Amino acid sequence: MATALLQVRIEESLKDDAARLFESLGIDTSTAVRMFLKRAVMENGIPFRMTLPRAPYEAERGYRAMMELGEAARRNGVSDMPLEEINAEIGASRAARRADER
């Protein structure tokens, strides 16, 4: 089978990182690229999902949720509950749920 030369320009650090990864998998970079190309041909497309996130990650939203939970805990008088007591409550709730399912 005749072979052809394929050249790709990438950042040196990416090349080095990928080479280390492939070496740990027992293959070289050329073999990994051939595997990618063969799989792309087999699947008639890129052999992995290429998607964009539906919505950007917003740390502020998560922070607000945590603050709201903290405020609810203070309002309900459980904000200073020790971990052992929290775990006991969770265990009791799970046991009650299991008993209801029977």
Image (cartoon, rainbow, N blue to C red):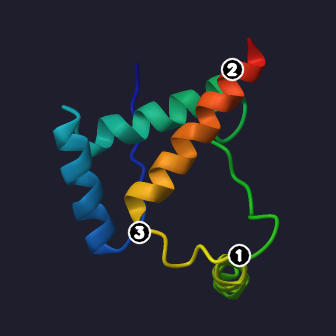
| Position of 89 relative to 95 (above/below) | below
Question: Dot 1 lies on which element?
Answer: loop
Q: Please tell me which residue lies in front, 32 or 82.
A: 82
Left or right: 40 in relation to 82: right
Q: Amino acid at mark 2?
A: Ala
Residue at (49, 78) in percent of width and height: 80
Q: Can see residue 78?
A: yes
Q: Which mark is residue 9?
A: 3
Q: Amino acid at mark 3?
A: Arg
Q: Please tell me which residue lies in front, 2 or 90.
A: 90
Mark 1 vs 3, N-terminal side: 3
Q: Which residue is identified by label 1?
A: 76
Question: Dot 3 lies on which element?
Answer: loop
Mark 2 touching mark 3, by CB under 8 A?
A: no
Q: Residue furthest front?
A: 77
Q: Picture coordinates of residue 52 (x, y %)?
A: 74, 63
Q: Amino acid at mark 1?
A: Asn
Q: Residue furthest top?
A: 102
Mark 1 vs 2, N-terminal side: 1
10 Å neighbourhood of mark 2: few (<14), some, or many (≥20)?
few
| Tally of marks | 3
Q: Nearer the viewer, mark 1 or mark 3?
A: 1
Question: Dot 2 lies on which element?
Answer: helix
Left or right: 59 in relation to 68: left
Q: Nearer the viewer, mark 2 or mark 3?
A: 2
Residue at (40, 26) in percent of width and height: 2
Q: CA distance from mark 1 to mark 3?
A: 60 Å
Q: Picture coordinates of residue 94 (x, y %)?
A: 61, 34
